[in-house]
């Protein structure tokens, strides 16, 4: 056995329905895949319905599971409420909410517009709040118990980090919400936990954040005591455990999975202090070019 192999028994999530925001790509897709393999039904959401439909076809063929794609911008509460109703209409009830949708800009803060800052806050913090409130209110109203909310945060949620200030600010808020509601809503039969991943490269996010040869210049594996980045299955294994009934006594916890990175040097992006002003200009142009092409 090694870290890239699957951990739980095949029926560990049988009968459960899980909503994964941002479930159509990156780590969200990896977690969705494993949930399906373990017997769960999964609702995946994002703003891109064409992409979601493609992922649904791919994952249903791969796993034999059931996927419901729902177009939803988590920044808007009315769309979140509609997503809740669509999920319930399809599956009857929802057992788990995984708040995974996120966004980020790597940039000196003084280069960010107020709107750019707001975009990250709205997706990460407001989006998590919207989904949590919508599902939480529904579960409380219907007196449904044994429900789980799992939030994806980051180690710089408690240390802060230069050059990703909007993300650090938003993730800190999500972590506070996780711990607060773990206490307040436990009486309603809900558990709240979070995962703080270290570097788990995904092609799309990595290319947007560190385009060109910057991935080589700022190799995050070098900051990890284990001298490697994470494997997606490792995160999927942890997420599956935390949403399963095997973790029923875990509540209000944040589990760090980063190979010891934050202990070695707090602030995942602090090393970007070494980037000269001219390179920031190049980085900004490259990101704008990629955005204009997409």
Image (cartoon, rainbow, N blue to C red):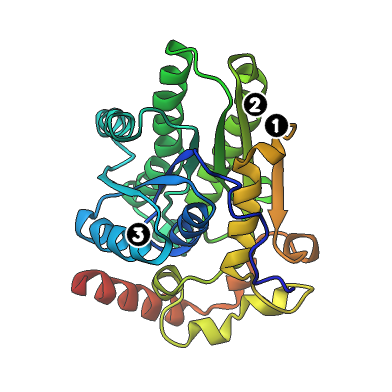
Residue drawn at x 52%, y 81% as measured from the top left = 215
Disc 1 element = loop
Choose the circle earlier in sequence order: 3 or 2: 3
Tag on residue 182? Answer: 2
Against 169, residue 145 (above or below) is above
The local crowd at label 1, few if under 14, some if 14 to 19, many if 20 or more residues have their Cα within 10 Å, is many
* Residue 269 visible to an observer of this rendering: no
The mark closer to the camera, 3 or 2, is 3
Judge from the rendering whether residue 100 lies leftward or rightward of residue 253; answer left or right: left
For the residue pair 274 and 13, the one nearer the viewer reads as 13
Q: How far apart are labels 3 and 1 at the CA level?
A: 31 Å
The image quadrant of residue 185 is top right
Q: Label 1, on which residue?
A: 251
Which residue has dot 3 on it?
Answer: 60
| Residue 18 appears anywhere in the view | yes
Which of 78 and 96 lies nearest the eye of the viewer? 96
């Amino acid at each position: 056995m090694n870290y890239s192999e699957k951990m739980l028994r095949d029926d560990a999530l049988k009968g459960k329905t899980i909503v994964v925001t941002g479930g159509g790509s990156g780590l969200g897709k990896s977690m969705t895949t494993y949930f399906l393999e373990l017997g769960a039904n999964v609702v995946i959401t994002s703003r891109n319905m064409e992409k979601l439909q493609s992922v649904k076809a791919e994952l249903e063929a791969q796993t034999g599971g059931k996927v419901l794609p729902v177009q939803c911008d988590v920044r808007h509460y009315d769309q979140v409420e509609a997503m809740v109703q669509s999920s319930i209409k399809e599956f009857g009830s929802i057992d788990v909410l995984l708040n995974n949708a996120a966004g980020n800009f790597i940039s000196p803060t003084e280069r960010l517009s107020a709107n750019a800052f707001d975009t990250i806050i709205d997706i990460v913090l407001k989006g998590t709040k919207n989904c949590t409130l919508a599902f939480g209110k529904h579960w409380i109203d219907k007196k449904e118990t044994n429900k789980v909310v799992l939030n994806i945060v980051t180690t710089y949620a408690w240390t802060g980090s230069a050059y990703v200030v909007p993300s650090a600010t938003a993730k800190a808020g999500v972590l506070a919400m996780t711990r607060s509601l773990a206490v307040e809503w436990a009486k309603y039969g809900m558990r709240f936990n979070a995962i703080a991943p270290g570097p788990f490269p995904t092609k799309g996010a990595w290319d947007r954040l560190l385009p060109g040869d910057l991935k080589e210049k700022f190799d995050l594996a070098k900051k990890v005591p284990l001298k490697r980045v994470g494997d997606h299955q490792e995160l999927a294994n942890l997420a599956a455990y935390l949403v399963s009934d095997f973790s029923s006594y875990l509540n209000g916890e944040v589990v760090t999975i980063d190979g010891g990175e934050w202990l070695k040097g707090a602030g995942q992006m602090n090393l970007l202090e070494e980037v000269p002003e001219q390179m920031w200009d190049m980085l900004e142009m490259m990101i704008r070019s990629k955005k204009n092409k997409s």
